[in-house]
Amino acid sequence: MPFSPALLAVLLILGGALQAGFNLHGGAKPDVVVAVLIGSLGVVGAIYLLLRGRGKAMRFVQTMTALAAVYLLFGVVADVLISSLSLEQLSKQVFEHPDQTPVLTSAQTLLIPAVVALVIWQICVMVSILRKSLEIPLAGAVLVLLLLFLVDLFVANLAANLLGVV
């Protein structure tokens, strides 16, 4: 990826807008959306600290640009697929009849594996980016991705508590 702080800023703004839009479309309260976005900022900070700790802080812009581009590209496709799944109807079936297997339409039967495959592919690409930028083994990159997920959850939960959401 090129060294372009402007491109990184654009990608981060677009990624945040995509995340906020999808969450709002899904019925999340604005305070929850803000907490989730703050969690994402925590991940950005954690990536900087990881790179700095490995003596590779100069790779921050390229690493974040690559991760933001992957999030945006995969996120747009995944959000479109997830939006077409009619999850509200599916969750209503599950809550009304928890003892019965929900009835899936043929479109849902085809789209659910596609979404799962897309998410797995996104994870693989992100692990590859982290592995190369941090110069660590594959297992280490998987652990770093799990750490970033936990940082996201922790910071978003902390922000939600501070905002009085939870």
Image (tube, rainbow, N blue to C red):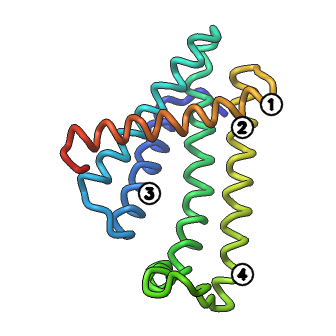
If you read the primary sequence from the N terminus, does the residue marked by circle 1 or circle 4 appear first?
Answer: 4
Would you name the residue on which mark 2 appears? 127
The answer to whether residue 136 is above or below residue 38 is: above
> Are the residues at dot 1 and dot 2 in contact (C-beta closer than 8 Å)?
yes
**Residue 135 spot, x, y in % from top left:** 76, 20
**Residue 37 spot, x, y in % from top left:** 37, 45
Question: Which sits in the foreground, 19 or 4?
Answer: 19
The answer to whether residue 81 is above or below residue 103 is: above
Task: Give the position of the N terminus as an image quadrant.
Answer: top right
Would you name the residue on which mark 3 appears? 18
State the separation of the CA atoms marked 1 and 2.
7 Å
The residue located at (66%, 74%) in the rendering is: 112
Q: Amino acid at mark 2?
A: Val
State the separation of the CA atoms marked 4 and 2.
26 Å
**Residue 82 spot, x, y in % from top left:** 55, 72
Would you name the residue on which mark 4 appears? 110
Q: Amino acid at mark 3?
A: Leu
Q: Amino acid at mark 4?
A: Leu
Which numbered disc, 4 or 3, marks the residue closer to the eye? 4
